[in-house]
Amino acid sequence: MASLLAEYHAFLTDNRHMSPHSVRAYQATAERLSGFLERHWGGAVDRTGLVRISAGDLRAFLADRRVDGLTNRSTARELSAVRHFLRFALGEDAHLPALKGPRVQRSLPRPVNPEDVVALAEDAASTAREGWVGARDWAILLLLYGSGLRVSEATGLMGDILPLGSTLRVTGKRNKTRIVPLLEAVKAAIEDYIELCPYPMMRDEPLFRGSRGGALSPALVRRAVQGARGRLGLSERTTPHALRHSFATHLLAGGADLRSLQELLGHASLSSTQVYTAVDTAMLLDEYFNAHPRASG
């Protein structure tokens, strides 16, 4: 199993081009699973042995992990990572045991927290069939959250934005142009995608490409998010547009004023931006009722 785990580590790093954080997380799950199966089956486990893994074995593994205090959401993520490892070990077309993840309580409408944004992007990227497609999905989801773009704005970007700087010129609704910030992490993700993309980056061609080289469809981005949130047990309200909402809410909570936020989002009127003040107030009240010792008095 040691050689298989080493192959998996190389696959995550060299083929999927995952971040070091993601590699550690997926590798740790694979190591936990292999260690558990050796105890559970009473002997060494190799690639061929994994073929006989059953839904009962996976249930036993997750029950064992529950002892460590995993929540439903964390357990759902662990199961997603297990499936990723098994697909690598047994092949994409292998028949994996059918096992539903734990029920995750649906949350009220609220921004996606940064940890879930990263988990969502990592899961979408890791399940892509090709490394460059995974790099593309990772980059575009970070862009939606990091710069507050609409999904149609992100898929509409052209090669003429290159080379990248610290800001990005975006054309939104009614052909209104605005300047948005480009975080270093997002910039690096886009540059990694460009390096791996098999299609040349021309000024008059789309930046984000579909598998056949044409413009990436917003529907494909939504589908990737839908699959990832299901595997991770996230709310159905976790959509590409929710990442834009999260960008706005987190900026407002950090001290941004409404006028600046209006410009960054490309809203035609301030009234469209003012909805985020209500969201931010709801977040503060939620924190109060959960944390304040006299909130229930």
Image (tube, rainbow, N blue to C red):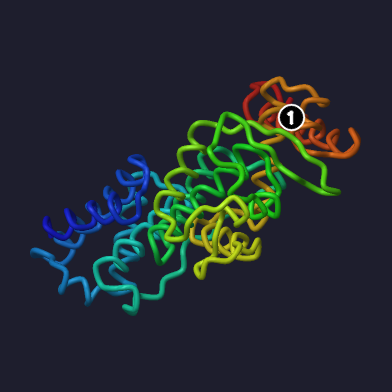
The x, y position of residue 102, in whole percent, is: 48, 60
Q: Quadrant of residue 220?
A: bottom right
Quadrant of the drawing holding the N terminus? bottom left
Is residue 63 shown left or right of residue 272?
left
Q: Quadrant of residue 162?
A: top right
Residue 129 visible in the shown view = yes
The x, y position of residue 169, in whole percent, is: 68, 38
Q: Residue at x 68, y 40 (%)?
A: 148
| Residue carrying label 1 | 285
Viewer-closest of 45 and 153: 153
Viewer-closest of 126 and 173: 173
236 vs 194: above or below: below
Amino acid of disc 1: Leu
Q: Residue at x 31, y 46 (%)?
A: 23
Q: Residue at x 50, y 68 (%)?
A: 211
Element type at mark 1: helix
Viewer-closest of 260 and 230: 260
Q: Farthest residue toward the front?
A: 203
Is residue 275 shown left or right of residue 229?
right
Is residue 257 shown left or right of residue 104?
right
The x, y position of residue 196, in whole percent, is: 40, 53
Residue 106 visible in the shown view = no
Q: Residue at x 77, y 30 (%)?
A: 261
Q: How many marks?
A: 1
Quadrant of the drawing holding the C terminus? top right
Viewer-closest of 180 and 159: 159
Q: Quadrant of residue 152?
A: bottom right
The x, y position of residue 64, in whole percent, is: 30, 55
Q: Residues within 10 Å of mark 1 (few under 14, many from 20)?
A: few
200 vs 175: above or below: below
